[in-house]
Image (tube, rainbow, N blue to C red):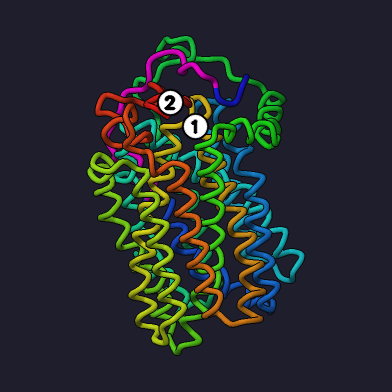
Amino acid sequence: MDPIDQTPASGPAPRPTSVLRPAIVYAFLFGALGTYLPYIGPYLASTGLDLGSVGALIALFAAVSLVAAPAWGALADSYGDVRRLLIVATVLSAGSIGLLAIARGPLSLALAMAMLSAAWAGVIPMVDSRAVQMVGHRDRFGQARAPGSGAFVVLAFASGALIGRTGLGGMFILFGPLVILVGLSSWLLLRLPGAAAPDGTAGRPQRRPGFSSFADRALAGLSPGAILGILRTPRLGAFFVASVVVWTAHGALQGFISLRVQDLGGDATMVAATWSLGALIEVPLMYAFPALARRLGPEPLIVIGGFAFAARALISGIVESPGLIVAASAFGGIGFAFFYVGTVTWVAGSVDRRIQATAQGIFTGTANGIGVIVGSIVGGAIGGAFGLRILFVLAATGYALGALIAWVGIGRDSRRPGAGPRGAGAVSADDRPGAGDRPGAGGR
């Protein structure tokens, strides 16, 4: 099958539901990440690795995700119901977390990180694709996603308090169980109400493909032809380039922002605040995203998000106060809320419903993975040679360049005739996922 079919998916779209159920899943999901992201770098360093080796392991995690994310997405699109795959992915992730907790030495740590990345890579794109289906209106996605940012803040500080008592290994005490809860809550809460079967009937058990079909589908998701098929239209291709540029700058900033705070005399509380203030800002902005998207369209919000990221990086590079760097992270919250939610929203309105998970995996998995790999490696080299101030100024330039590419590719004509009052990626109140979710719909 052509990766982007020009006809809508057969059968009626699932009935929309409340944002509450996906919101609970997102709270577990990003709460789990709150116990991991701020502390994995220090944990790896505490095992005796130097900074270069720590950066290499982070790049390895991203490299494996780069391959695994589209494979999980292709499996999910083939299978239809992501809940079983989420159970498998989270159980495998929890096992990998256990191995990471006991691993010692570069090789065992690298193996555990690679296994965790391979298992975890598809979780967020699969949850994203199902959440978009469940809420019915794509511009309501931010309301479902917002509690995840709040949970990230709470669990980041809770994990920090636990680490203060148990040492850095204490992060795994919360991380592993929360990952299991992601799978359980996905199974219980992410069922599509009244979803139609592929033949248009509802409630009739469907014959699932066998294991060999799953393997073939996963490998097909890794093929350049499948990825290029999704990116073949100019707007999708241009936005993918913009996403890679933005996430590369983001990888450079996030990989070294804690070191910048510490170099300026900030303590562990300030490091935690640097990661958490932006997440707090994300919550109201994600709730407000539907109203903003109705007024402006998601495309301009994506562009604004890129420039907000740039403002944070520039301020973090030129100031000499850790408190100001913490304050600047508010711009990071604006950037993430608009760029990430805008990406999921825009992609959901630009591809057929049958390949939603694959497309989300490419834009939120593959693009992000490329960015983390390049950003961590190149950022480490630039920071080591010229200092973190120069690195962050260059990151600001990268963010701004990505925003400009997005504007040229998808933003500047979002209000042209035929695109609708809210932009090409926005949807009307009656739009459901799958209705017009194909290139050319809505003036694209």
Which sits earlier in the primary sequence, circle 2 or circle 1?
1
Q: Please report contact status of discs 2 and 1: CB closer than 8 Å, yes or no.
A: yes
Kindly give the residue lying farthest to the bottom in the view shown.
265
Q: Is residue 123 magenta?
A: no
User: Which residue is pictured at 53% across the width and 39% down the height?
Assistant: 87
Kind of residue indicated by mark 2: Asp
Q: Quarter holding the N terminus?
A: top right
Highlighted magenta segment, given as a residue range: 5-26
Instruction: State the residue in front, 397 or 381.
Output: 397
Which residue is at 41% across, 51% downward?
Answer: 339
Image location of residue 117, percent across then percent down: 62, 52
Q: Secondary structure at mark 2?
A: loop
Per the image, label 1 sits on a secondary structure element best described as helix
Q: Could you tell me the amino acid type at mark 1?
A: Gln
Looking at the rendered structure, which numbered label has been put on residue 356? 1
Q: Within 10 angstroms of label 2, few (less than 14), some, or many (20 or more) residues? A: many
Judging by the rendered image, the residue that carries numbered circle 2 is: 437
Taken as a whole, is the magenta stretch helix, strand or loop? loop
User: Percent x, y for residue 252?
Assistant: 56, 67
Query: Which residue is found at the position 48% from the left and 29% from the top?
Result: 351
Q: Is residue 20 left or right of residue 107?
A: left
Q: CA distance from mark 2 to mark 1?
A: 9 Å
Q: Position of residue 443 (x, y in %)?
A: 39, 27
As drawn, 391 above or below 334: below
**12 falls in the magenta region:** yes
Image coords of residue 365 (percent x, y) = 56, 47
Quadrant housing residue 60: bottom right
